[in-house]
Amino acid sequence: MAKKKPEILDHDKKTGKITLKLRKGLYPLDAVFGAAYVMIDRAYVFLDKDEDGNVLIYIHAKPDEPGLDMEALAGEFANEALGQVLRGRIMKEHKNRLELIVSQAVAGAVGIAGMDDIGLDDLGLDDLDGDDDDLDFLDDPLGIAVPWEEKYKKSANEQRPDVVRGEKQEAEAKEQPGPGDSGGFNPVDNSDPS
Amino acid sequence: MTNLRFHRKIYRMGSLQEVMDSFGEFGTFKLEKDGDYFVLEISDMDEEFEEILPHEIANYALAQTIENLRS
C-alpha cells in the first residue's frame, strides 16, 4: 500500500539537507507553495518533481541556523502544507460570502471617507461654512436670549403711536392745573361789552 | 560553474528572469530550456559567495514564483 503521508526520502545529517516526497494529488501545488513560502526565511527550500509527478522538497539549513532540527522542520512543512490545503478549501467554499463581506466593508469605509471628497459646496451648505466663523457662542445676533419684556417694551413703544400719544397727553396734562388744583382763580369776565 | 535545474511546472520563466536581473552583479547567468526544466547556468561567481549563492538564488526564484502567482 502506497504511503500517503509525506515521505522523507533522504536526510544528510552532515550537510543538513533533507528531502521530502509528497504524493501526487494529495497536496495541491498551491499548498506546497504556501508551506514553502513560510519556511524560506529559516531554510533553503527547493522544489522538484519526479518522473511520476510526485513533488520533491529539498530543505537545506541556512548557515546562520546550524542547530536546526531538520526532521522537525520537515514535519513542520507537512503540517503547514496541510493547513494550506484546509485554508484553500475554506476559501473556495465560502468565496462568495467572503467577497460580499469584504465588498460591504470597503463600501462602508469609502462612504465615510468619501465625504471629504464631496465637499460642502455640493450639498449647498455654503451658508453654513465660514460666514459665522467669527461668532462666539455667547453672541446672540437674533436676540433670542433677550428677555421678552425688555425686548417688546422698547420696541412696542416705538411701533405703537397711540401709546406715544397717550404718554404725551399724560405729560401735557401734568403741566396744566386740574379742578382740584389750587393753581389760581380765573374768573369769567361778564362785563358789558357795549 | 554551477547549474540549477528548475522544473517548468513549478518555476516560471518570468521569475527566473527576475532572478538574473537581481543577482546580476554576483556572477554571469545564462538561462536555457532542457526538456521539463529551465537550466540556469551561473559562472564567474565571487569565491566568497560561491557556496551560498546558488541556495539564495533558488530561494529567491521560489519566492518570486509564488508572489507572481498570487498577484
Image (cartoon, grey):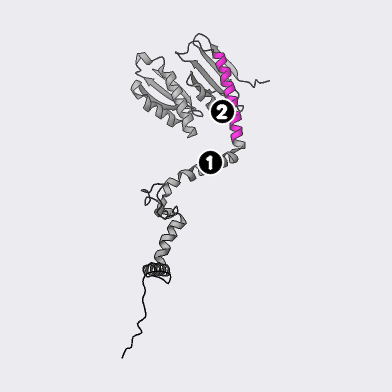
Q: Is residue A56 magenta?
A: no
Quarter of the rendering occupied by the C terminus of chain A: bottom left
Rendered residue at 50%/25% (across/down): A37
Rendered residue at 57%/42% (across/down): A100
Could you tell me if the residues under marks 2 and 1 are in contact, i.e. CB atoms within 8 Å?
no
**Residue A152, horizontal then vertical, whole percent:** 44, 60
Numbered tag placed on residue A40 in the rendering: none
In the foreground, A15 or B39:
A15
- Name the residue carrying label 1: A105
Magenta residues span A67-91
**In this rendering, position of residue A57 left or right of residue A135:** right
- Which residue reaches farthest top? A14
**Residue A71, horizontal then vertical, whole percent:** 57, 14
Is A163 above or below relative to B40?
below
The type of residue carrying mark 1 is Ala
- Using the rendered view, name the quadrant where residue B27 is placed: top left
Q: Is residue A80 magenta?
A: yes
Q: Mark 2 falls within which chain?
A: A
Is A144 above or below relative to B41?
below
Quarter of the rendering occupied by the N terminus of chain A: top right
**In this rendering, position of residue A91 left or right of residue A37:** right
Is A45 above or below relative to A181?
above
Q: Mark 1 falls within which chain?
A: A
- Name the residue carrying label 2: A31
Q: Which secondary structure dominates the residues rendered in magenta?
A: helix
- Which residue reaches farthest front? A191
The type of residue carrying mark 2 is Ala
- Using the rendered view, name the quadrant where residue A19 is placed: top right
Q: Secondary structure at mark 1?
A: helix
**In this rendering, position of residue A171 left or right of residue B8:** left
Mark 2 and mark 1 on one chain:
yes
